[in-house]
Image (tube, rainbow, N blue to C red):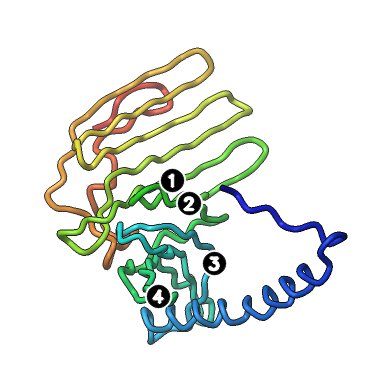
Amino acid sequence: MISRPLPCTFAALVCAAGAALAQDAAPQRAAQLQAAVDAALPTKGFSIWTSAEGDLDGDGIADLAAVVVDLSGEGPREERLLVLAGTPGGGYTPLSVSGQFCRANKFYNLEITATSLLVQGVWRAEPSGMDSFTMQFRYNPKLRDFELIGREDLAENDDARSSYRASVNYLAKVAIYTRIAGKKRKDLKAPLKQPAVLRLRGFNCGDESPMDPLVYINEDFTVRR
């Protein structure tokens, strides 16, 4: 059942009280979240860039996933993907945190579906097209951490009616590549050699890893291995 707000014309006192409580709660909520971020990353001045809430570890309590950044230093920004586990009292405790994350040029979108965390990073967003990646992390109770189970990289050029997509399924250990240019299309399926589980804790986007494609379909539709 979805609760709907009371019209203020009929319940002015209730609405005024509700608005006052919301204003009072917002700073407290922000302070609570910042304290949880500081507990997970005590040596840095990280703040939340974007976040999503949902029950990721399956205990019936809402958790929080966030991309956090530290802009205080010189050079490239420090950036982490952080998951905070919700507690029965309404607080949070650190569950997992990455190493240096991906530094998407434009923005991130986070979505929680069941026990999966979808992280979309956008490198380019223009009227002519978009370049992005999407990672899917899933909570693994045996590891008490999240593992990377899928990734998709997508480059779209609307002006040239072309696109390139690389989709990796780490559970099935297979990668599918698709290049489209006008009416021309080429698909390629390749096995993925993955020696170990890719965990969120300590995950570093800059590392050489099995995320890198094993093959590539060039713009002339030839396959490079």
Residue occupying the far front of the picture: 10
Q: Is residue 61 above or below residue 173?
A: below
**Mark 2 or 3: the one toward you:** 3
Residue ID at (61%, 29%): 158
Give residue 92's mark. 4
Q: Earlier in the sequence, mark 1 or mark 2?
A: 2
Cβ–Cβ below 8 Å for labels 1 and 3?
A: no
Give residue 121's mark. 2
Q: Is residue 34 above or below residue 181?
A: below
Cβ–Cβ below 8 Å for labels 1 and 4?
A: no
Residue ID at (28%, 59%): 207
Q: Earlier in the sequence, mark 1 or mark 4?
A: 4
Among the 4 quarters of the image, the one containing residue 98:
bottom left
Is label 3 in a helix, a strand or a loop? strand
Q: CA distance from mark 2 to mark 3?
A: 12 Å
Residue ID at (60%, 45%): 125
Q: Nearer the viewer, residue 28 or 81?
A: 28
Determine crowd level at label 1: few under 14, some 14-19, many 20+ residues with C-alpha closer than 10 A: many
Is label 2 in a helix, a strand or a loop? strand
Q: Earlier in the sequence, mark 1 or mark 3?
A: 3
**Mark 1 or 4: the one toward you:** 4
Residue 167 location in percent, x, y?
34, 35
Q: Amino acid at mark 3?
A: Trp
